[in-house]
Image (cartoon, helix red, strand yellow):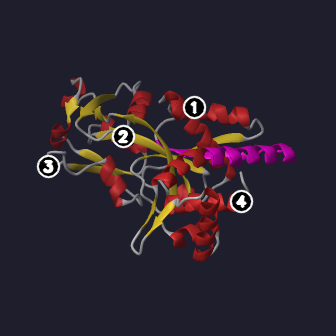
Amino acid sequence: MSGVEIRELEAFLALAEELHFGRAGERLYVSQSRVSQLLRSLEGRIGAPLVERTSRRVGLTPLGESFLSDLRPAYDALCAGIDRARTIARGAGGVLRIGFQGSVDDHLGRAMSLFGDRYPDRAIDIVEIPLSDPFGPLRRQEVDCAVVLLPVTEEDLALGPVFSRQPQTLAVSVRHPFAARASLDAEELADCRLIGIDGGAPDYWRRAQAPGRTPGGLTVPAGPRVNTLQEGLSLAAADRGAMLLCRATADHQGRRESLAFVPVRGLPASELGLVRRRVRPSAQARAFALALAEVVGASA
């Protein structure tokens, strides 16, 4: 690699994600000036600027964008290879703890299978995380990574890959007037009480899962708030309100005799994303993210 040092590449990757020299330094536990020094050294080896710096912003040059798209998968593969070698050298496995909301869809199932093939000595624990606290278990290090509904804009968490983009579905009691419908328009949500999410989830995240207005501006009546998916489904089955779900969760719950699941037109599609700690993510989380990215890429 013509003398390129791994620390230079790490500095560029951190800066490309943070677009801020100070925050990139915090991630790497070095000073802001050291990040700048490493970047200048890398740009000197390449022969052209990778980053545009002004007094107000930091951005990637077109060459920087191209370099990032080539470097990121190669760097992740290198880290995963090192992790595999360390596991073999230690002769012992570990545990990958994956937090999830709802159900494990096909992407996750195949990614876990791929991870298991690569790391046969590592067990996988599946931990259901509450709707009311989507990011807490990750921050408390109770899980290595978590699969949550988007949006995710937490500064201390890294998002990706994103997958399972599908229309939203409304869970209602079989006694509800919507139960016999083949589909609904989003404006019709003004005619039902929408079950919301309680607890410590950020406001922007709770509003995305239970919007207070339709796309056309009509008020959506607020129903009861819940902490878990099962609480919400139980209230919907009792006709206490209706609950928006991602398609994968609706399909998984479709066997319930007391509930009907009706697709909703006109709402933003639901998406799932893998979330990790931005600073010092576990090696298991990094390796699983790489496996999931391969699965998502293969099915795209």
Residue 109 is tagged as 1
Residue type at numbered disc 1: Gly
Marks 2 & 4, CB-CB < 8 Å contact: no
Q: Is residue 109 magenta?
A: no
| Secondary structure category for the residue under label 1 | helix
Q: Above or below — where is 158 with respect to 259?
A: below
Q: CA distance from mark 4 to mark 1?
A: 36 Å
Q: CA distance from mark 3 to mark 4?
A: 54 Å
- Pick whichever of labels 1 and 3 is earlier in the sequence: 1
Residue situated in front as seen by the camera: 189 or 195: 189
Report x, y in % for residue 63: 50, 52
Residue placed at 63% from the left, 59% from the top? 10
Give the foreground label among 3 and 4.
Answer: 4
The residue that mark 3 highlights is: 217
Q: CA distance from mark 2 to mark 3?
A: 20 Å
- Classify 10 Å Cα crowding around label 4: few (below 14), some (14-19), many (20 and above): few
Give the foreground label among 2 and 4.
Answer: 4
- Pick whichever of labels 2 and 1 is earlier in the sequence: 1
In the rendered structure, which segment of residues is drawn in magenta? 74-101
Residue type at numbered disc 2: Ser
| Secondary structure category for the residue under label 3 | loop
Residue 44 falls left or right of residue 104: right
- Pick whichever of labels 2 and 3 is earlier in the sequence: 3
Residue placed at 15% from the left, 50% from the top? 219
Residue placed at 41% from the left, 69% from the top? 57
* Res 226 seen here: yes
Residue type at numbered disc 4: Glu
The residue that mark 2 highlights is: 270
- Classify 10 Å Cα crowding around label 3: few (below 14), some (14-19), many (20 and above): few
- Classify 10 Å Cα crowding around label 2: few (below 14), some (14-19), many (20 and above): many
Residue type at numbered disc 3: Gly
Residue situated in front as seen by the camera: 287 or 35: 35
